[in-house]
Amino acid sequence: MSQQQVNVGLPPNTRRSFSFSSLRVKKRQNSYEEGGFPNRRGLLSFSSVRETRKERDLDDDGASHLHRSQDQMKRTGAIPSGEDEGERQGALKRFSAMWSSFRKGKRDKVKDLEPAEQADPAAADNSSKQHRYVSGQYFFEYLVVVSLKKTKDGSSYEPQITYQFPKRDLMARYQKEEEEKTLKAITLFCFPEGINWAPLTEYHSETFSFVLTEIDGSRRNGYCRRLLPGGKGARPPEAYCIISSLACFGLFSKIFDEVEKRRQISMAMIYPFMQKLREAPFPAPGNTVEIKSFIPESGTEIISLTRPLDSWLEHVDFATLFGCLTDNEVLLVFAAAVLERRIVFIADELGTLSQVIHAVAALLYPFTWQHTFISIVPEILIDVVMAPTPYLLGVQKRLLDLVTDQSDLLVVDLSEDKEKTFIVSIGDESSIVPPKLQAEILEALSRRQNTSTVEELNRVVSEAFLHFFVKTVGHYSSYVKSGGSGECGVFEKRRFYKAIEPKTTRHFVKKFIQTQMFDLFIQEVEQQQPGQQPSGIFHRKILEYQEKKKRDKTKKH
């Protein structure tokens, strides 16, 4: 891809300092596992951040945009220092405008609501539709087209939303303001490279994703397809972005195929297809929905969209991960992730970064990554790598020099022309997982050679790591002491890990139970009502393993 690469208003060799904090938010309504724990969280983009009320001393001319960006950058886990950096002011102001809505909670929305618009029946009807969408009736919330438009001085391009479906005319005023700022933020992730592009004559389309997490914990997924629009001569690419609460990358990739096909004919052809899709019910796992759509010269087409049976894996494609890394390398990355370390993935392609980082997070199931999670770090946010707290970051390779000056982290090169996979490492990654369990995981992963479909591959890979958690911490429920009537249970941590044999496994578990992902998992178990048994895949695998141990013990006697 021919592209001018510059730092967006950032002087060379200049770095910002950031302070990070993270928080476990106890009550979430997202779940990767149908029928599992009712309050399981989904993957968070950026960080789940503890609100810190630190006042900063600012110069008068820098106070305005830095105070605005303080709350906004917390959404990404980064709080800029109070120094005034005039050279970057323009870029940071653009960014701060994008993120100003993300720190607002529901209380602000109620406060800002204007009575006149609240009484508007059209707005009320729209609110009802939004509720039905959240309940799962709609495939997506909206589609936007982000185009690169020349700046006023003609020296560069800026991403702007040039098309949106459906229109948001019926929103109340506070909703429009919130949504407008969210849409501006989306442009940053559709074109994370920066604002300076050169017109192109050839460009291979690419698909990638990101996650937007509101302050109340609700999640929206952004699915992007970047392509070169129809026309003659050199022209900048454009991005199609679908925002949905549904995590299903494969399904939306197919939807983008249909959108791209219609875009080559006419922008007007996109509208009827997306309207049909929006009206269609989202299928249950393993089921298919059919969309009828008319295309000139082709007639009416029927597009079939099928959800995988393993719905908790429908946002994951392990093929990309294992196409970039060997089994042993994946195991080392997993070891660093399971102890919540800082990990940066490097690649040229946006699709590779987003697929791999989601796949690594999925290896942790039934636990959920609790810290900073940015599948594609926009260039303007590259200093997020300086955060001292755990993170999973995807960074384009051209920014590698801005990453490798950090220590105490794992930098993983996913590119085809890499000299070595682990550019930076702590050095103890191979000793984190006990040797016997490493061998079992590698043996299980070797079975993926016999898989023929994405679903089979996902199942083999996920079960290899799920079995690891079953063997190491699957006995957790026996060490949750029930409370009295209406009281929460209490997890007996010391008795739990003391019961583990052999010592190498106990040593690992003693470290693992200090992580936030395990802590939140146990908090949710403690909050269950006495006698309430969790359902779902992890619990079923635990029961199967316990039954097998009983059978093996009986055979020995």
Image (spheres, grey):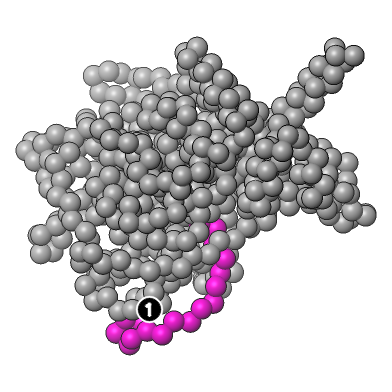
User: Quick one: SS at disc 1?
Assistant: loop
Question: Which residue position holds label 1?
Answer: 82
Query: What is the x, y in percent for residue 506?
Result: 71, 41
The answer to whether residue 109 of the structure is visible from this angle is: no
Extent of the magenta region: 47-63
Residue located 85% across and 18% down the image: 553
* Location of the C terminus (image quadrant): top right
Q: Nearer the viewer, residue 78 or 12?
A: 12
Q: Residues within 10 Å of mark 1 (few under 14, many from 20)?
A: some
Query: What is the x, y in percent for residue 65?
Result: 34, 76
The answer to whether residue 331 of the structure is visible from this angle is: yes
Horizontally, residue 383 falls left or right of residue 547, namely left
Q: Nearer the viewer, residue 75 or 482?
A: 482
549 magenta-colored: no
**Residue 375 in the image: above or below residue 9:** above
Horizontally, residue 401 falls left or right of residue 131, namely left
Q: Nearer the viewer, residue 23 or 478?
A: 478
